Image (cartoon, grey):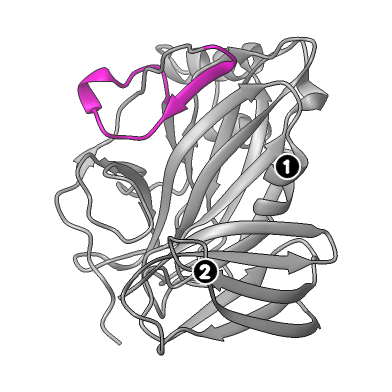
């Protein structure tokens, strides 16, 4: 299958976010001119790094997305080690959590690998200042040495986006940055990232459960796959239309991945409720 191409990309520099209530920042990658204070790090030595598209048209994502490539039409196979580093932020005593949407773009070549880390801002700044000095007093290896104990590391298991929530309670009272690292992969396509936010307080049980499941493809015309990344077991899936009428109800024998055939449904928006041994969550799907 021919790999999908994403066009209209602009170089990603840095981002600016605004405070609102208990949201420390919320970035949706829709306005390059308003974005500042994020960093890029290319540790593999090529000229490919994270980029952004302000007005992308990718199913399941917002208008803006950030992306990193493990394959391009021009260069062919790539072996990235690309980091996208957020602005510094201080977590209050009651902690907080990060939320983001991530996934592969290609229905066949989606198995991108990534990890998410939290690094202390003072240690990161020291390395960045050292890399910028003349002569340099720090190396890329000094940066990589900061990336220990990832809060999340995985290979994308299914095509389409998945929402992830990460508890940051262990960093309460500290000034830190979040690192999104695309690495340990070659010759797939693109890793997409969207809707990155950090919120103070404790992550709700619903957010935890929601982050355990991905639904793809979405939109779909026939088979929808419910995948699980955190050992939750699916016991049932029900689908309701916008009026709340249940139009499909399927039981499963505690499976980690379930498939639902929606080909018999009319085109439109539906709410899919996934029941599991960890609780239930509802996700919106679109039938084409």
Q: Is residue 258 above or below residue 166?
A: below
**What stretch of residues is rendered in magenta?**
21-38
Q: Residue at x 64, y 62 (%)?
A: 213
Q: Disc 1 on helix, strand or loop? A: loop
Q: Residue at x 43, y 61 (%)?
A: 242
Does the magenta run of residues contain 22?
yes
Q: Quadrant of residue 122?
A: top right
Q: Disc 2 on helix, strand or loop? A: loop
Give the label on residue 31, or none.
none
Q: Residue at x 54, y 11 (%)?
A: 21
Does the magenta run of residues contain 138?
no
Q: Residue at x 40, y 46 (%)?
A: 45
Q: Earlier in the sequence, mark 1 or mark 2?
A: 1
Which residue has dot 1 on it? 151
Image coords of residue 68 (percent x, y): 38, 51
Q: Is residue 156 above or below residue 265?
A: above
Q: Quadrant of the C terminus?
A: bottom left
Which residue has dot 2 on it? 245
Distance CA(mark 1)–CA(mark 2): 39 Å
């Amino acid at each position: 299958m021919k790999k999908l191409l994403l066009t209209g990309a602009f170089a990603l520099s840095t981002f600016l976010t605004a405070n609102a209530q208990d949201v420390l920042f919320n970035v949706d990658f829709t306005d390059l001119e308003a974005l500042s204070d994020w960093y890029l790090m290319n540790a593999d030595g090529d000229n490919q790094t994270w980029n952004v598209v302000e007005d992308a048209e990718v199913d399941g994502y917002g208008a803006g997305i950030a992306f990193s490539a493990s394959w391009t039409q021009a260069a062919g196979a790539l072996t990235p080690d690309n980091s996208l580093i957020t602005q510094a932020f201080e977590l209050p005593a009651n902690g907080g959590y990060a939320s983001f949407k991530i996934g592969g773009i290609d229905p066949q070549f989606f198995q991108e690998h990534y990890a998410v880390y939290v690094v202390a801002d003072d240690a990161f700044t020291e390395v960045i200042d050292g890399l910028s000095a003349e002569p340099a007093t720090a190396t890329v290896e000094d940066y990589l040495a900061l990336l220990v104990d990832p809060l999340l590391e995985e290979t994308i298991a299914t095509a389409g986006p998945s929402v992830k929530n990460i508890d940051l309670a262990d960093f309460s009272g500290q000034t830190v940055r979040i690192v999104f690292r695309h690495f340990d992969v070659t010759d797939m396509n693109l890793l997409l990232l969207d809707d990155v936010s950090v919120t103070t307080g404790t992550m709700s049980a619903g957010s935890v459960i929601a982050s355990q499941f991905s639904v793809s493809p979405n939109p779909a015309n026939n088979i929808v796959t419910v995948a699980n990344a955190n050992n939750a077991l699916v016991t049932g899936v029900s689908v309701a239309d916008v009026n709340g009428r249940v139009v499909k109800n399927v039981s499963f024998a505690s499976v980690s991945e379930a498939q639902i055939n929606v080909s018999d449904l009319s085109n439109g928006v539906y709410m899919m409720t996934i029941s599991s041994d960890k609780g239930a969550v509802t996700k919106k799907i679109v039938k084409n």
